[in-house]
Amino acid sequence: MREIQEHPILKLARGKEIWIKFSGTPIRAYENETVAMALYREGIDVFTESSKLHRPRGMFCAIGKCSSCMMRVNGIPNVRTCILPAREGMVIEKQDMYGKLPESIEDFPEPCEIYTDIVIVGAGPAGLSAANILKDFNIRVLLVEQNPKLGGQLIKQTHKFFGSENEMAGTRGFEIANILIQNIKDSNINYKTDSTAFGFYPDSTLAIFQNNQLLKVHSKYFFFATGASEKMIPFAGNDVPGVFGAGAAQTMMNVFGIKPGKDILMVGAGNVGLIVSYQLLQAGINVKAVIEAMPKIGGYFVHAAKLRRFGVPILTGTTIKEVMGTKRVEKAISIGLDEEFKEIEGSEKEWNVDTVCLSTGLMPSVNLLSQAGCTLKYVSSLGGYVPIRNRELRTSRETIYVAGDVSGIEEASTAMVEGKIASLAILEKIGYATGREKEKNIEELQRLREGPFSSKIVESLGEVTYE
Amino acid sequence: MKNPIMICRCEDITLEDIKNAFSMGFTDIESLRRHLMIGTGPCQGKTCIPMLEKIISEMSNKDFRGVITTRPPESPISFGSFLHRGKNEKL
């Protein structure tokens, strides 16, 4: 129903057809598709309802960070269906208020202890590039990813990357991901998908949940590349199905070949908002406008120019005021803002859209670092709380390293270089000689941050980097 | 009917709820969390806490950033996975 039929860049191949049950109704799904994606593709907007006000809930973040798509799956409540692969015969039900305990524990295998030298949490660009360095050394590496696929958000980037030759500039994001992923699959690295790291305990045990099993990981080094989540903004109707994170729309289109909607209003004209708007056009979807609260466009000129060529208006000094509709967005109202970001009366504009995408910033996913006792600092231009680290990405704890968006919101090219630097630093600590590799990558990172857009980032990183 | 401004979508807490609680004297994140249960749902405040920090910082002219601690589990997992399975054991 919402399948993308033709795409200028992506070859959309679906897996074998399988059937699941949603509230008693058979629903077609495909192998390699998640439950939430199957439901959405079949035209279902409302998955379940909220616990107190019974408001409709559907897809929101699409990458396992929020709670919007949680349902009861085969009797187990609170399952994040956006990251749960569909399996033949699965029974999906609305949450019954707070859910019920399952009647038997047959489905839960005994916990398992894992001993390793390095555990990498998150297989996005930072985690993958670290694993690509570590795979050539004789050490035990465990790579865990909570999504069903390796690659993090890199697998949905269909645009060609800027940056340097070393980081495969000119290549599309998902193609870079494919290369890095294949290298890992061909190596001895122990990787686990569908695995959520949910706790870091005082005895330095990292707790992971995979397929109903608890994995207790004991490791000499911890490498957190947990990425970020999309920021929500307050406006009337911000929880109505059809209001998505822009990243969620990108996941639907570029990973699963699904149209997020028919007519879109994009909120936020940073690079994410501009790039995703263009990709929506590529998928054959109508982007009515991009609105931006700031007085000027935040993203690169090239991305904005592409949209303008397609006649998409970009309205600055404008924000979203309200969304109408109950079970799906039916209309959106924008409003103009003055220089002090106060709403200008009478400047409301009505948009006939069924979808509102929010690209209003990202927030580093630092919860596990906070549990581990790493020192965090709030730096608004880096997205929120970020860990204090040295130039080798070591946090305030000797054995804990970070790379990518969790250490401050930037982009995939810098995340990949950070992944290399941190993994080389760990190797040196273990006692391997890696020559000038680490220094070379530190220089490379400086080069990537030389542009005028990076000056603010460089300044902010100075606030959280010691030594 | 106009849709509410939802702040915490796990626990169904709206901007209106926060304003009311604030006027009743719940003026910091910890007491709002205990009173409203905002941020205590399955996503553990990933969506709402940054908005809440901003809202009450504006309402009270104080800086509330950096006061939240998180404990495991930081993502929803099944408690069944914590159980060692004995023979014929039922919940």
Image (cartoon, rainbow, N blue to C red):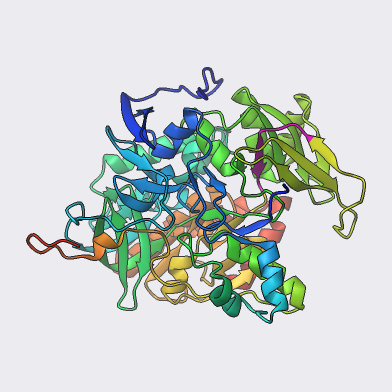
A32 and A415: which is toward the camera: A32
Kindly give the residue lying farthest to the top in the view shown: A6
Residue at screen point 41% across, 47% down: A71
Residue at screen point 73% across, 36% down: A331
A104 and A136: which is toward the camera: A104
Kindly give the residue lying farthest to the left in the view shown: B87
In the displayed structure image, the side of residue A344 where residue A114 appears, left or right: left
Residue at screen point 48% across, 53% down: A67
In the rendered image, residue A353 lying in the magenta stretch gets the answer yes
Q: Quadrant of residue A162?
A: top right
Q: Which residues are magenta?
A: A351-359
Residue B35 visible within the image: yes
In the displayed structure image, the side of residue A171 where residue B73 appears, left or right: left
A388 and A325: which is toward the camera: A325
Residue A299 visible within the image: no
Residue B39 lies, in percent from the top left, at 54, 66
Kindly give the residue lying farthest to the bottom in the view shown: B25
Residue A389 lies, in percent from the top left, at 51, 71
In the rendered image, residue A20 lying in the magenta stretch gets the answer no
In the displayed structure image, the side of residue B50 where residue A222 appears, left or right: left
